[in-house]
Image (cartoon, helix red, strand yellow):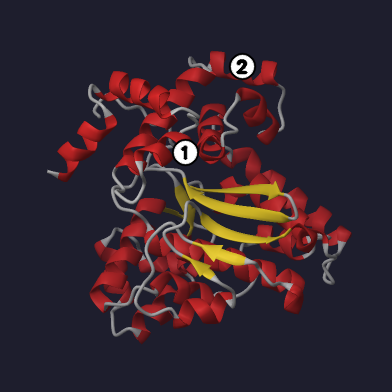
Amino acid sequence: MANRQRIQTPENGPDARAAALTSYPQVALRLGLNPHELMRRFGLDPATLMNREQRIPFSSLCRLLEATAAESSTPSVGIQMAEARTAFDFGVIGLLLAHKRTLREVLLAMVHYRHLLNDALGLYIETVGTQVIVREDNLCEIGVWPRQTMELAVGVLSRTCAAVLGPNWRPVSVHFSHSAPPDLRVHGRIFGCPLVFDSEFNGFICLASDLDQPNPMADPELVRYAEGLAESASAAGRQTVVAEVRNAIYLLLPVEQAAIEHVARHLYVSVRSLQRHLEEEGTTFSNLVDEVRQELAVRYMSNERYPIGRVAALLGYTQQASFTQWFSRRFGMAPRTWRANRQR
């Protein structure tokens, strides 16, 4: 895979706000570990806990939480951190979210200002009949599946929804793509709804009507004030067009919507404008789709729980034969052979 190209945010790849670690010390201490010692092991300065707006490498965050779970034999580290977090703990974005008119507006604002929260996690909202799927996706390769970080992200997102709707927040189900831990008591306490593990996505399903319930804390004046501050911060922090397009493809490919028209709509630009920007940066939309498809192919094929037919569908192929032809050209062997070689 030496020829694989990855367009990331500057220097150290995707990052996140140090606020992601807000509740880490108390959880680590509760589990009998030294939080500062563990943070230093993964290149994280404990002093960043005093500046929650500082950016930290996403890969370091993931590895820290996985090591904490392993060394404490506690697979619920991410969920415990989410439970200990304060609602709307997102800096200036938190002020904006807390006072939006509806949960739908809150989620759309999180999509719009994602680059100010976490460059490596994407949020996608899909309406299916009377229900809505809210999906969070890891958009980068870090060498280890960030189980704890995904549970932290989904837990914080669910708590944000609960803070907006109060007792009216009743998700249909919460989903995780990894397997279930032996003890689900903490998960049951924070989500209070059916849990689905080994799912095809990370996130939750709720009723479409929930998204349009009024937020009792709504305040348009505060929202306008916060939006001004957020846009100022965005001016210096936005990703390149290429990075934004790749992230959108990551989110839309598994739901068969990674056509350029859908991506352009997702990014609020016209197709022609999007093509022009990509040409200026020396690439094309089809090249980016192929790059992302290759990265996702490795991720999904490495997971034996995914049948090859399902991997084909997740990569946007309606026919498994077409996927096999593409995979063989790209990797030099058929999918079954590649998976067999990896198992050996």
Q: Earlier in the sequence, mark 1 or mark 2?
A: 2
Q: Which residue type does callout 1 highlight?
A: Leu
Q: Residue at x 65, y 30 (%)?
A: 262
Q: Nearer the viewer, residue 150 or 228?
A: 150
Q: Position of residue 317 (x, y in %)?
A: 48, 29
**Is 289 positioned to the left or the right of 208 in the image?**
left
Q: Which residue type does callout 2 highlight?
A: Gln
* Disc sitting over residue 314 in the figure: 1
Q: Position of residue 34 (x, y in %)?
A: 29, 79
Q: Nearer the viewer, residue 291 or 202?
A: 202
Q: Could you say which quadrant of the image residue 86 lies in?
A: bottom right
**Is 207 positioned to the left or the right of 52 in the image?**
right
Query: Badge 2, how many Cα within 10 Å: few under 14, some, many 20+?
Result: some
Query: Which residue lies under the disc numbered 2?
Result: 275
Q: Quadrant of the N terminus?
A: top left
Residue 238: in sight, yes or no?
Answer: yes
* Residue reaching furthest to the left: 344
**Is 344 positioned to the left or the right of 100 in the image?**
left
